[in-house]
Image: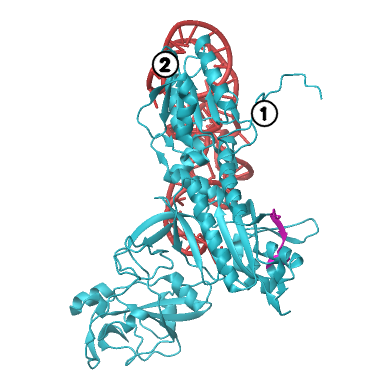
Chain colours: A cyan, B red
Amino acid sequence: MFLPYPHPFPHATIRPTHSMFKEPHLMRMTQMFGKTLRQAPAEAETPSHRYMLRAGLMHQIAAGVYAYMPLAWRSLRKISDIVRYEMDAAGAQEVLMPALQPRELWEQTGRADAYGPVLFQLKDRRDRDMVLAPTHEECITNMVRANVSSYRDLPLNLYQVQSKFRDEPRPRAGLLRGREFIMKDAYSFDADPEGLDISYQKMVQAYRNIFTRCGLPTMAVEADSGAIGGKDSHEFILPAEAGEDTILHCKECGYAANVERASFYLPVLPNERELPIEQVATPGKKTITDVAAFLSVPESKTLKAVFYAAEGKLFFVVIRGDLDVNEIKLSNTLKASGLHMATDEEVKEAGLVPGYASPIGIKGVTVIADQSVTNGSNFVVGANREGYHLRNANFPRDFQADVVTDIAIAKEGYACPKCRTPLSATRGIEVGHVFKLGTFYSERLGAMFLDESGQQKPIIMGCYGIGVSRLLAAAIEQNHDDKGIIFPAPIAPYQVHLVGLNLERDDVRAAADSLYDSLTKQGFEVLYDDRREETAGVKFNDADLLGLPVRLVVSPRNLQQNAVEVKGRTEERGRLVGMGETADVVKGMVS
RNA sequence: CGGGGUGUGGCGCAGCGGCAGCGCGCUUGGUUUGGGACCAAGAGGUCGUGAGUUCAAUCCUCACCACCCCGACCA
């Protein structure tokens, strides 16, 4: 092999000690692709979106579709390397699956329709229906089916890190909700429920390790498992203002749940003697607030009637007046798709009077009661007659329900279901989600195995996702100030931002070059601002914007003392360190 | 899918029937140099697309497209 030039990376054989990258990680700003913007593009509002565009981390190609530029890609690689390490450590094996799949595969599980318009669909040249995979349960189950046939092949855990596609109704906030995004998904396969419990717990622990190692503390909360998920499901939430999820948690006992699923303790009302029912005139009083005030009773002594419609049917929902319906819980109870609040017309068609509807004497409509109707007595309810309500309605004396269950939404300040301490609310970003899937996919796709007694059984599955690209955005969402990004050290694109000032001076440039060289040789990842034409202010502002953990300044002023200024991104001001001690000081800051 | 908004140079914006402008960025030369320097000279635009009105359309009308925000939705 004959090289006409000196090798461009003379340190390629040096093994880095502080970096997870095996290749040399040299980068001078004069060479780096991507530039910073003083003003963020107008379309970006969320901090992470604005900073990622301003700092030259990514480039938008379409709504919810972005190209990752070198800095973002380095950060994403660090995240996915941590993910890979922990998944491997937990015994999972990495695979890579196609994004392009036949629609037929999705028809076998019924999810082609279930996903609806969110599923990207296309045709190949032979007019065959194809999809871009939004997730990979079908694909992996199909693959496992062909390769697992005995309990001896189990347990098994396979994972992938790759792009997934969802035609979201509304892409949002840059990488927080994209239509093409990078996701890590792991799928576990077990012979029995106990095995699934173990696989699940291993993944939960791996997730805690991953987020901790990324420098991103998350909370694991109980989550709604949706229509297909099994009984257990947890989300990993990164607290941040821009988050789309609301979490209720108890500071006393640690209970934490997504509001979609959170329950709460409802104080027991004193048992009253049931009084005879009576009608009262309540002209023009349609809302619970009005009725309660008009009759001088607390809202907890009223019952609220709410109507929902789904799949052409009307559902009469009764809940205590001081509570509100959680539509997700309701939807899970009804197992109906397309649930929505019924219109006044739909209500009238069922022979009911909006504003004065009553569960008493109702026929031909499914009645769902929140369990709160059993907590309290002598309620005020509608009389199903314009302008009238009934006093002293009692369950089950005066009305019955087809289902009585928990369909109430929890709110901040309500009592913790476990210890009765008032619950706190936090907004957060869902960065991970684990499910116990059960046998939904294995049954439909025929992924069976023979157990020890020779009996054929469906494999029991779990799935475990981490939004890798979303995690990057979430990290910035949680870690920034008015100057720019504040990267947690483990996922920063580079560890050190080396700023050279007055580089046209030979002595300064020589010192900065040599520090860059030396740190790089020792395995540090250094982004070297070697631009001669930019002023100090520009360089400092770019350093703040890019948000690398450590900033080093080599300048004539510092050089007089044979020193380098060292400043952490979050520190107010830097301190001078002898040139020779720089590496040790930096090491302490990034590890 | 409903409501709202925006499309003019790489980014931020102004212009509003009659020669397409400003700031930043970019190029060249010079002066500067520790928190987004200064002077001078330049390069760069099918004014989102199509149709219509008009002597004349970036501007008015209509349709479409794209992007953003709120909501619905988000296994």
The kind of residue tagged 1 is Ala
Secondary structure found at label 1: loop
Residue A330 part of the magenta-drawn span: no
Could you tell me residue A61's position as x and y percent?
Answer: 60, 43
Work out whether residue A118 can be spotted.
yes
Compared across the picture, whether A551 is left or right of A160 comes to: left
For residue A98: magenta? Answer: yes
Mark 1 crowdedness (10 Å alpha carbons): few <14, some 14-19, many ≥20: some
- Find residue A366 and report its horizontal and vertical position in percent: 45, 85
Let me know if residue A505 appears in the view.
Answer: no
Residue at horizontal 26%, vertical 77%? Answer: A300
Q: Residue A254, located in which quarter of the rendered image?
A: bottom left
Is residue A419 placed above or below A464 in the rendered structure? Answer: below
**Mark 2 crowd level (few <14, some 14–19, many ≥20, 10 Å Cα):** some
Question: In the image shown, does A380 or A268 lie closer to the viewer?
Answer: A268
* Residue type pointed to by label 2: Asn
Which stretch did the figure color magenta?
A95-106
The tag earlier along the polypeptide, 2 or 1, is: 1
Label 2 marks which chain's residue? A
- Please tell me the numbered disc located at residue A558: 2
**Picture coordinates of residue B27, whole percent (x, y):** 58, 17
> Percent from the top left, x then y, of residue A112?
65, 66
**Residue behind mark 1:** A12
Identity of the residue drawn at 50% across and 47% down? A213
Query: Is residue A459 positioned above or below A23 on the image?
Result: below
Q: Nearer the viewer, residue A51 or A168?
A: A51
Quadrant in which the N terminus of chain A appears: top right
> Residue A35 or A125: which is nearer the viewer?
A35
Chain of the residue that carries numbered disc 1 in the rendered image: A
Do circles 2 and 1 both sit on a common chain?
Answer: yes
